[in-house]
Image: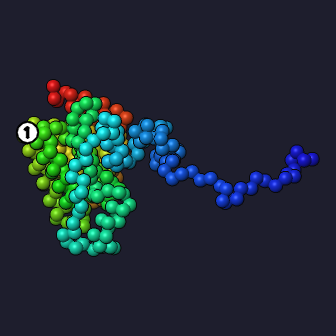
Amino acid sequence: MAWFKREKKGIITSTEEKKEAPDGLWNKCPNCKKALHQSELQENKYVCHYCSYHLRVGSKEYFEVLFDDSQFTELFADMISGDPLNFVDSKPYSDRIQDSMRKTGLKDAIRAAHGKVEGQELMIACMDFNFIGGSMGSVVGEKIARSIDYSLEHKVPFLMISKSGGARMMEAAFSLMQMAKTSAKLALLSQAKVPYISLLTDPTTGGVTASYAMLGDINIAEPGALIGFAGPRVIKETIKKDLPKGFQTAEFVLEHGFLDFIVDRRAMKAKIAAFLRMVQN
């Protein structure tokens, strides 16, 4: 009766002989939970093949998606936040900055670069959520201001890619000042009739939403992005009412007139290039 009785030991592989998948080879969609191969995900612009969920990515990936042949010149790369208030919470702010720099390989929550999108020149400032929640500190404000100055000097359109939890509390008023500073710079850009495109990605909240993120000549968002000022939980507790379905999603914000359109990341480059051709001809 060997057909149902195991006569030999099962396959046993020693720990030393087991093969592990290299780190970073696979990812998992936060929405549908399906496994995604990194090379296929990269080819699909970091959008899930199964449910079209837009995964959160940083400046490296956006530059790769938008710039022709991933070629660009990074500007103002060496700026690092100071600690003007000697702020300490669970750890000193200066230590938190150093830890974030080591973990992310970034100098702060934003990078600025100049390159071409389908042959059209474009200046891009892109925020990174992995660096202290994409919070807006002095370096973020200064890099945006300098990017706008570059656009003004060279008459190059400016694209701001926002992804932020809001103001950086460790810099207090220094952080809040960046709202006025960047808004004033954008007013100069408008006076010079240099196009400004604002792209809101998941999440765009707090002082970023209340300033430069909503001041574009056109305001674009990615599908499903969280866009708002205060968080849904805070609003619900304040007004003591249930919030509408889909509240603070890009689709809800578009319906209420705060966005011009929502664009799938896979079509983003072509859409931005079409807008640039339209305004420059």
Figure quadrant of the C terminus: top left
Given residues 224 and 135, the one toward you in this image is 135
Residue 132 sits in which quadrant?
bottom left
Residue visible at 57% across and 51% down in the picture? 21
Toward the right, the furthest residue is 1
Residue visible at 31% across and 52% down in the picture? 128
Given residues 43 and 279, the one toward you in this image is 43
Residue 61 location, x and y as percent?
36, 44
Q: In the rendered image of this protein, does residue 94 appear above or below residue 158? A: below
Residue 191 location, x and y as percent?
7, 40
**Element marked by disc 1:** loop
Residue visible at 16% across and 29% down in the picture? 280
Given residues 274 and 201, the one toward you in this image is 274
For the image, the number of numbered tags is: 1
Residue carrying label 1: 192
Toward the top, the furthest residue is 281
Q: Is residue 43 visible?
A: yes
Residue 98 location, x and y as percent?
32, 66
What sort of colour scheme is used for the picture?
rainbow
Given residues 165 and 188, the one toward you in this image is 188
Binning the other alpha carbons within 10 Å of mark 1 as few (below 14), some (14 to 19) or many (20 upward) gives few
Q: In the rendered image of this protein, does residue 13 appear above or below residue 60? A: below
Tag 1: amino acid: Ala
Q: Is residue 252 visible?
A: no
Residue 179 location, x and y as percent?
16, 55
Residue 235 sits in which quadrant?
bottom left
In the rendered view, does 251 fall on the left or right side of 210?
Answer: right
In the rendered view, does 138 fall on the left or right side of 223?
Answer: left
